Amino acid sequence: MSIDSSDTLLESNLANLIHRGKVRDTHSIDKETLLMVSTDRVSAYDVVMPNAIPGKGAILNQMSVFWFGMTKEIVPNHLINFAMDMEDMDLPANVRRRSMIVKKAERIDIECVARGYITGSALQEYQESGKIAGVSMPAGMKEGDLFERPIFTPATKAETGHDENISIENMEDMIGGELTHILQRMTLEIYQFAHGYALNKNIIIADTKMEFGFIEGELSLIDELLTPDSSRFWDKNLYSPGSTQPNYDKQFVRDWLASQGWDKEPPAPKLPDDIVNKTSIRYREAFDKLTEIDLR
């Protein structure tokens, strides 16, 4: 699979910018709608890397559009339209393919994480305490093991610096018990649907994070959904508990950074070309396998 290294967008450079996140640039269209641009920036450990992953933004954007369409009957979401389908949108082609038009939402500042398998920060917490998100787990679990049932592990959402895992009790203190339990149910319902769908495409969704907000009083999914940035995608055919799993996500970037002895504080080291290219290829493979549609 060839990657067009010239197809890179680090910043949207459009008018009416209202927010620049780690990956997305958000622009105001009117009082009720926004243009959300997925750039090719890549972050790891909540730090933005100095160089981009070519084509990554188009993959993130179009995969989110795909999943928002697949799950809208389960939980409503903020998507209005994919910018490529809006003939009256006067945008450069490299921005259009990376953009969606969305409804404005009142964001809930908590990341809702569903985990079907133990890995990443959950594994680290388990190894240190025997618990995940404050809940005791069975003894003897190892990297990549399947949980008896998917678990919900919230985290605070940081604009800068590192997100922090919290317990469900902490979340209840922040936003109330009723809303916490609704978000937990919605997150796990979306995860279980997507996990079952992906297994039929030979991909395991090990975990994923979601964000929610209120749109005219209705609780809705916002931001991105089930992308290689927000999820861990493993190769079902190569799945082997007890070891690091072959993946289609940015774990490849994380692993390289770990090998460099980086302290996870900015500035991050520049990613070498081979890591950039291999990450691009893995993101594209995830898109092709899961959606079976043409990337535009």
Image: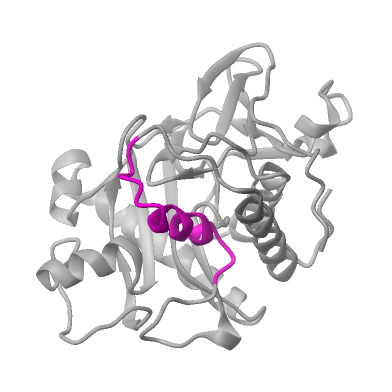
Depth check: give the residue in front, 206 or 2: 2
> Which residue is located at x 30 percent, y 45 percent?
263
Question: Is the residue 245 above or below the residue 233 in the image?
Answer: below
Question: Is the residue 221 above or below the residue 123 in the image?
Answer: above
> Which residue is located at x 81 percent, y 62 percent?
293
Callout count:
0
Q: Is residue 99 magenta?
A: no
Viewed as shown, does residue 132 lie left or right of 212?
left
Screen quadrant of the N terminus: bottom right
What is the magenta range?
Answer: 247-265
The picture places residue 198, in percent across and down from the top left corner, at: 60, 74
> Which residue is located at x 14 percent, y 48 percent?
170
Residue 191 in view (yes/no) = yes
The picture places residue 78, in percent across and down from the top left corner, at: 57, 39
> Which residue is located at x 61 percent, y 25 percent?
34
Viewed as shown, does residue 148 lie left or right of 30?
left
Viewed as shown, does residue 62 lie left or right of 138?
right
The picture places residue 159, in percent across and down from the top left corner, at: 36, 30
Q: Is residue 248 magenta?
A: yes
